Image (cartoon, rainbow, N blue to C red):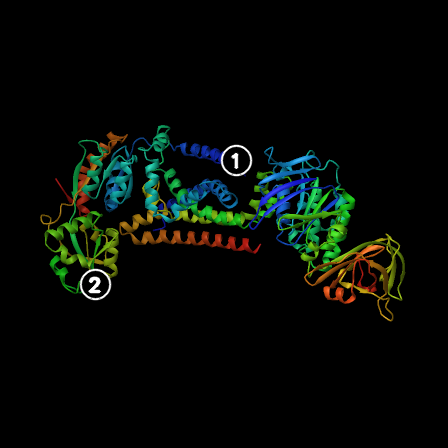
Amino acid sequence: MTISKFARMAFSWLTVILFMLSAEVSARADEVLVSAAASLTDVLRDIGKAYQLKSKHKLALTLGPSNFLARQIDEGAPADIFFSADLAQMDLLEKNGRLEPGTRKNLLSNQLVVIVPANSKLSVASPKDLMKPEVKKIALADPAAVPVGVYTSKYLADEGLWDKLKPKIVPVLDVRATLASVESGNVEAGFVYKTDAAISQKVKTVFEVPIEKGPKITYPLAIVKESKKKEAARDFMNYVLGPAGKTAFKKYGFVVLD
Amino acid sequence: MLLRCRIPLANFELDIDVSFDARVTSIFGPSGAGKTTLLDAIAGLRPIADGEIEINGRTLYSSARGLNLSPQQRGLGYVPQEGALFPHLSVRKNILFGAERHRDIGNAEGISIDHVLEVLEIGKLLDRPVTELSGGEAQRVALARAILSRPQLLLLDEPLAALDIALKERILPYLGRVRDEFGIPMIYVTHNLTEVLTLADWVLMIQQGRLVTQGIPQEALRSAHTIMQIPDEQFENVFTATFIESDAKAGRTRVRLRSGTELFIPYLPQPANRSLQIRISADDILIGTRRPEGISAGNVIAGTVHGIELVDGQALVPVFAGEEFFVRLTSGAVTRLELKEGTPVFLIIKTRSFRVL
Amino acid sequence: MIFSVETWHITVFSLAVGLASTLVILPFGVALAWLFARRDWPLKSIVETIVLLPLVMPPVSTGLILLKIFGRRNPIGQWLYDRGIEVVFNWKGVLIAMAVMSFPLLVRSVRTSFSEVNPRLEQIAATLGASGLRIFFVITIPLAYKGIVAGALLAFSRALGEFGATILLAGNIPGRTQTLSLAIFNFVQTGKDPEAYVLLGITVTLAFVFVWCSEWLLRAGKRA
């Protein structure tokens, strides 16, 4: 087998594959694809189900870490709506001109809470209590990159506690990892959103950061500029922003901004 | 056949420039002399730096003309040292593998499959899986495979090297038959003198990648080079002899050499073909300056010392007694007996030291 | 019940696309492995390294590179898009991610098998007049096929377990591009552990079976 024979074979296979790739399933023209942060999975599913009963449009969700989603959209992935877990990702897309002007809404907010293992005997009633020696390790999603980590470090800095607590911080991958480490008892406490704490039975919330004092956590959503189904997207977005949507979000523990 | 090539190797350069025409040409030399490399080059399996290879007027390779035929196009039959039978195919599929070769490239005269099966006696092996063959059977199958691809030239790379002595003895005649029955010229690589003396019409002696001598085996091998190469190996004399009569009770058979000299060899029943090849090792012949008496040896022949080659404490002494007998002695013995060219001597050989092919 | 239709869908989808991706890379992998095992050529070591990269780089990095290549902003992605071929957020993206990530495993495995075929056999076949293609299909492949199948099984297992590149290139769309790995991620993220464990059980079982078969074939091949 010479190299030229290989090249020829490779070329013909490449053609076959391109042919395969072009075989398209029937186009679902009116399906709105929402790219949303993983923490919004359940609430969006509920909203989506209700929406599709009323509307002729269909809905599809793609879920993941907000930074991955933003990256995809930046590279031209065909999402119609982007629903992020923090402002930074949305700002990035806005800066790169990927958003449909005028459609961005800062819809939701969340509340930062301190959790401890459900069977913990420690008395932690405020962030200051975290300085106690019995609290050896505190789990927090990567304070350099993940929204909840960024928000928390900023809040603690504003309270003058960051420098003292930093040595105790154990950075983990994300919110789910935070929950898991607190559940396991490997750490004595952790910081998550109120909506996240609700997921787990094995942790208890000991402190809710007051909304006025807490960081401005915002979940923005917007229509993607290159979307081909802007009308359907607008229709869904209106539903989300309407009473039905707001009720659902509140039910899951989100704070709805007006 | 015209062979000229230059191949760079690890420690030296293989540099050959020969031209010869013979039924069986042997390439003789110690291991590492470059013999397998040479065969690979002739077969087109190895790049040559510079040279020319021509067989029967057909050029296989020419650096001057930028010609380099692929192995497929060279029309050669290669029997490698390990046989290299295809382990996943049956014996039948193996030997027929090259049988479809294009007429122009292969040997124009058809060779029938049955003939080959008969000569090499592998007919009953046809449907056996290759992995169940014995060493000797595998070699014969490899030979059949090469022959049935109708080559213009057979290349054999030490085909008997992997076999034990008894097996070597059994397979050697088959090679002789191949030479006689199929008329395909052979290039036969070996470091075993007996094979050269038995099969070859012409020998090329290679050492360190260079041709040191070539010629008719019986003459070309009479040199210091030969002795240097085979200090501990068998050096055998090979003669053609005619059967005269056998004596079962005495345990011996009388034969006559071409020169008329008569010898006693171990008993064998009257063979169908009265022509035999007999062998006697150069180490098994004694030299006496006087006719001995009261000894057990059955053969005492008068002759004359024809030369003395001394190398490293060994002496190779060709003695002419109707035919040339090579005798290997210690140099001490040569000195003690004061042997010189022309000294009349007696060759003393035990009947039982002779071997028949 | 946890063993729902959805579970079935996800499993079948993962198996189907995994199988397709393995079939797609098979001819390329075998051909490239042969070139690696039997030939030397300029830039060979560079190509070897590139082929190895998806194996050693974090899958997310590979996914990013794939996204860059197939996204609309890039000439290749643009070219495909103009012809109506979409890869991102599509089963095709899943296939590509799986193919790229499992390719190095296939090539390594097959290359080893080819190296273990005695080159003398191929040489003798050539002297007997067999063309390159005939040698390849009648001598080399039959003697190496156990290793090839083992490599394909290994690649298939890897494809099934693929996550990082898949989520970046194809997205995590339930019912459309969600594989077993992505579904497990989803369930874990939303605290639905029991569902996650079910899928995890399926994934581990499948991986175990395929890898075990792969190893068995390799051992059987050596005994032959």
Tell me which residue sits at (48%, 36%) in the image: A10
Residue C191 appears at what percent x and percent y? Answer: 27, 52
Nearer the camera: disc 1 or disc 2:
1
The residue indicated by pointer 2 is: A119
Within-10-Å neighbours for mark 2: few <14, some 14–19, many 20+: few
Labels in figure, total:
2
Report whether residue B45 is seen: no
**Quadrant assignment for the C terminus of chain B:** bottom right
Q: Which mark is residue C184?
A: none
Report whether residue B59 is seen: yes
Gap between marks 1 and 2, in whole Å? 69 Å
Circle 1 chain: A
Picture layout, residue C220 above or below residue C75:
below
Within-10-Å neighbours for mark 1: few <14, some 14–19, many 20+: few
Q: Residue furthest bottom?
A: B294
Judge by depth and name the residue closer to the eye, B229 or C11: B229
Q: Is residue B225 left or right of residue C163?
A: right
Tell me which residue sits at (40%, 40%) in the image: C95
Judge by depth and name the residue closer to the eye, B136 or B195: B195
Q: Pointers 1 and 2 in contact (CB under 8 A)?
A: no
**Quadrant assignment for the N terminus of chain B:** top right
The residue indicated by pointer 1 is: A5
Circle 2 chain: A
Tell me which residue sits at (29%, 41%) in the image: A62
Residue B292 appears at what percent x and percent y? Answer: 86, 68
Q: Secondary structure at mark 1?
A: helix
